Amino acid sequence: MILVTGAKGLIGRHFCARLRAAGVEHRPFDVKRSPAEDIRNLSAVAEALRGVRGVVHLAAVSRVAWGEREPALCNATNVDALASLLRMCAEGERPWFVFASSREVYGAVDRLPVREEDPLRPLNHYARSKHKGELITQSAAESGLLANICRFSNVFGCPLDHPDRVAMAFAAAAARGGRISVQGPMNTFDFTSVQDAVDGLCRLIEATESGERLPPIHFVSGHGTTLGGLAKMAAGMALKEVIVEEAPARPFDMSQFIGDPTRARSLIGWTVTADLRTEFSRLVAALASEPGPCDAGDRS
């Protein structure tokens, strides 16, 4: 049995679907399934841990803007609840543990592409909470728990994603018409399809289950796309009229990130297989035929 926290989030829903397809027994845990399944609810977490051989921890306040708006909640969810979860794992049945972090932990970078061993200088509340989460997880690993860390980068590709994620917002405008607000046209990011992200997570779990203790691994394409370029792509695919507007970058956002995928390839055999343009086009088509996106208030 594998416990999956944040099972109804962007990565969690696709990861659980992959587990179901493979016949892997798993236990989803998410506040969207039930208010009781809040990762801060320690009694519910303790019950969910019963009989599990592994934990994939995806639950988090997962948006930079939400962390800025509610820093106390971000810290309680991403740091305090994680510390309690790891303590219960260590004091209980000692399942293996995989912690999902973010490329946000790198902050202002000195070079591109970024490697996992580069300095971590988080710029915002969300990033700092993920950095603290990594330190807590590493401490648990040093104390004997089998725990590994991965970092995701601008994951996209699901029509049920939060509407304020940049790829989702641009694709929704292309599908349904409206305005595309480009906050920092030259800001550059490394986009990863959700299917590639899930594949990386599955490979990391296989390595963890086999007993491998690995350094942090980020799942990145190695290719950068400016927000202005992504907006141009969206406008070129638009099924209805869109208006592209440029705006200043938010002061708490990273401005540049392209990752080096070498470690993921060498340690767990993972590489990106999806093409950004192809996957973005699929997302636009899906949004044109699907109902609206999931609740932007989801904390999974």
Image (cartoon, grey):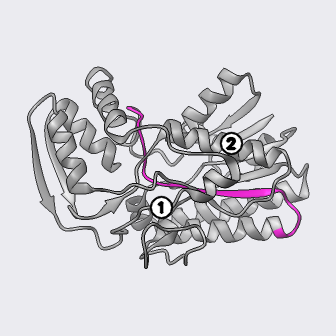
- Relative to 33, residue 21 above or below: above
Q: Secondary structure at mark 1?
A: loop
Q: What residue is pinned by disc 2?
A: 203
Residue 156 to residue 218: above or below: above
Of the residues shown, which amino acid type is indicated by label 1?
Gly
The CA distance from mark 1 to mark 2 is: 19 Å
Looking at the picture, does residue 278 appear above or below residue 201? above
| Secondary element at tag 2 | helix
- Residue 109, how many percent across, how many down? 43, 75
- Identified at 60% across, 38% down, the residue is 199
Viewed as shown, does residue 185 lie left or right of 86?
left
Rendered location of residue 4, percent (x, y): 68, 40
- Please count the marks in the image: 2
Q: Specify start and end residues of the magenta stretch as a single range.
A: 142-159
- The residue identified by callout 1 is 259
Q: Find residue 60 and report its horizontal and vertical position in percent.
A: 56, 54
Above or below: residue 119 compared with residue 25? below
